[in-house]
Amino acid sequence: MVYLIILLALIVFSEIYDFRGKFVYKANMPYMFLCVCFILLAGLRFFVGSDTHNYVYDFSVMPELSKLSEFHRLNSRYQFGWDAYVCIIKSIFGNFVFVQLITAIIVNVIIFWFIRRNTTNVFIALLCYYILNYFEFNMEIMREAIAVALGLIAIMLYSKGYKKYFVLLVFVAFEIHISAIILLIVPFLVKVKYSKKKIIVISLLSIIVPVLFSQISGLTEIVSLFTASDPEYLSRYINQSLDDTRNIFYYLFLFVSYLVIPIICMFFLKEKTKYVGFIMAFIILRCLGMFTYAFYRFGNYFEPFYWILLADAIYIYWKKIHMSKLLITGVFTLCVLYIYQRDQMGEYYMYPGHKLYERYIPYEMVNTTNHNYTNYRSQYYFRNGNH
């Protein structure tokens, strides 16, 4: 129910402030209100998300600050930056809820800042973020979400000429999650401008390269060379999407989502398309991600630019439609929810008998009585993992 309330608020605010063209300053309070909602929803959850139990376990075995270096060297599979981040929070607060709350603050404040900075259609962009990535960023990949947020700041700084700060932030992001290595291609993307030829070339590459790449032997060793990762651990991500059970409709659906739709949006916006280079990188990485999960993770760093593209294209296109924008927004949202979330009706492969959507539904919230990470477990046992 709480998810639906936020969704309805996003639809209503999109109609009032984006489609009706209200002055930007009038949207400050609703925008801040949604930011707080996004933070609290993720920050005060209790074992919501399939990976939360892993983070809770890692938090429980984290040593005191004085022993962090030895622990990281001998026991940790994470980057030192993440271990230090968790260790500091544990030393101060002693409860995992503060890890997810502080992470939710960092991730969502930066994302809300990024959206406000790059489009006037802020609520449409937030709607795209909420439907496409909010649950994954905030309830699954917390480490990478921080790295993505830092990457957004780094990209904005680089575009303003602050190259030293860019390098520093990329280093910090890499120390949080190794996938931040993809940010090294940013200097090649910043100055890319719109042209039909480039879009056609990118479209062809997005179809051809993933197929060729899936045939490369020793892919794990190649990626680990650039990420300094443990090949055995990395192989789980490399091979995760190389699944013989996937049929042609699965790949067609992904091609439409990550290639056809962004290409149509760019053709529609033409020279008004923002951050063309980042959209092109997003398309290629997402198409590669159909076959190799590691590249899907790389695509997360450029997904926020996709929200901006969608928001701008939707606004300009729907200005030409003489119908109720609230009705159209509602229909659009329902269609996207159905298409994007229909996979959630499938069985959760790690826990037979449970559906994927059960990772998030029903929502559980921490409190001081029976929902405390220190002493209690979720009433939905599959959320507690094997620890």
Image (cartoon, rainbow, N blue to C red):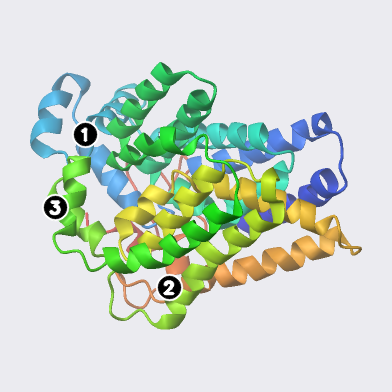
The disc label shown at residue 101, or none: none
Which residue lies most toward the right here? Answer: 322
Q: How many C-alpha atoms fall within 10 Å of the one at disc 2: few (<14), some, or many (≥20)?
A: some
| Residue placed under numbered mark 1 in the picture | 62
Task: Name the quarter where the C terminus is drawn.
Answer: bottom left
| Residue placed under numbered mark 2 in the picture | 355
Please state which amino acid type lies under the numbered disc 1: Met
Residue at 19% across, 38% down: 61
Residue 63 is left or right of residue 49, and the answer is left
Look at the image and tell me whether residue 321 can be seen. yes
Task: Locate residue 336, reporting x and y percent.
Answer: 63, 66
Q: How many C-alpha atoms fall within 10 Å of the one at disc 1: few (<14), some, or many (≥20)?
A: many
| Circle nearer the N terminus (1, 3) | 1
| Circle nearer the N terminus (2, 3) | 3
Residue at 56% across, 45% down: 276
Query: Is the residue under label 2 in contact with that under label 1 (CB below 8 Å)?
Result: no
Task: Locate residue 165, reporting x and y percent.
Answer: 42, 18
Please state which amino acid type lies under the numbered disc 2: Lys
Q: Quadrant location of residue 178?
A: top left
User: Which label sits in the foreground, 1 or 3?
Assistant: 3
Q: How many C-alpha atoms fall within 10 Å of the one at disc 3: few (<14), some, or many (≥20)?
A: some
| Circle nearer the N terminus (1, 2) | 1
| Residue placed under numbered mark 3 in the picture | 221
Q: Secondary structure at mark 1?
A: loop
Q: Is residue 337 above or below residue 128?
A: below
Please state which amino acid type lies under the numbered disc 3: Glu
